[in-house]
Image (cartoon, rainbow, N blue to C red):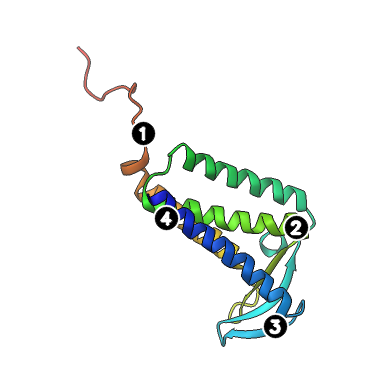
Amino acid sequence: MLYAIFAVLGAALLVLDQWVKHWITVNLPLGESMPFLPGLVELRTVHNYGAAWSSFSGQRWLLLAVTACIVLAVLYALVRRIVRHPLGLAACFLILSGGIGNIIDRARLGYVVDMFQFQFWESYPVFNVADMCIVCGCILGAVWYLWFYEKYDKKDAGNGTSDAPTE
């Protein structure tokens, strides 16, 4: 049941990401900006041909391939039920939503549409809903792995050695 709930939420975030990208493209010319949360965040239309901070700029196919591999690895972990704890599931579906959202842009347009710019941190890259999903998913995934994986999701080895002395 949790898988279905998180899948629906993930799909909703993917739809939101694509809708926001479409809205910003139609309503705000490239390079223009407008206030969103005054003093905190403004909307700015940017075409990102690379990854964060425009790293790997112009490497469309490499970025598509790497993102697709990550998405497939996360899907594998979900299908094989390697991740079962709710926090781990939330992390996986957030990463899937964001990864697929950016894959759609790169495959369809050749770049990713970004729109959120921190006003108080000028050097921080412009980002989008998919990027927020990926970052939140990675943070949740790290918390899940560090505090919950051993207790809830790790499979017992079964053939290990015991600490008891042998006679």
Q: Earlier in the sequence, mark 2 or mark 4?
A: 4
- Tag 1 or tag 3, which sits nearer the N-term? 3
Callout 4 secondary element: helix
> Nearer the N terminus, badge 4 or badge 1?
4
* Label 3 packing within 10 angstroms: few (<14), some (14-19), many (20+): some
Location of mark 2 (residue): 108
Q: Which mark is residue 110?
A: none
Q: Eyeballing the image, is 68 above or below 112?
A: above
Q: Quadrant of residue 149?
A: top left
Residue bearing the label numbered 1: 155
**Whole-Å distance between the Cαs marked 4 and 1?**
24 Å
On the image, the x and y values in percent for residue 2 come to 38, 51
In the picture, residue 113 is in which quadrant?
Answer: bottom right
Q: Amino acid at mark 2?
A: Arg
**Residue extending furthest toward the right:** 58
| Element carrying mark 3 | strand
Task: Tell me the distance, in whole angstroms, between the alpha carbons under discs 3 and 1.
Answer: 50 Å
SS state under label 2: helix
Residue 12 appears in the picture as rendered: yes
Q: Is residue 16 left or right of residue 142?
A: right
Q: Say which mark, if any, is on residue 5.
A: 4
Q: CA distance from mark 3 to mark 2?
A: 24 Å
Q: Nearer the viewer, residue 122 or 105?
A: 105
Mark 4 or mark 1, which is nearer to you? 4
Q: Earlier in the sequence, mark 1 or mark 2?
A: 2
Label 1 vs label 2, nearer the camera: 2
Closest to the observer, 155 or 80 = 80
Image location (x, y in percent) of residue 84: 38, 44
Q: Which residue is mark 3?
A: 33
N-term-proximal mark, 3 vs 4 = 4
Give the amino acid at mark 1.
Answer: Lys
Classify 10 Å Cα crowding around label 1: few (below 14), some (14-19), many (20 and above). Answer: few
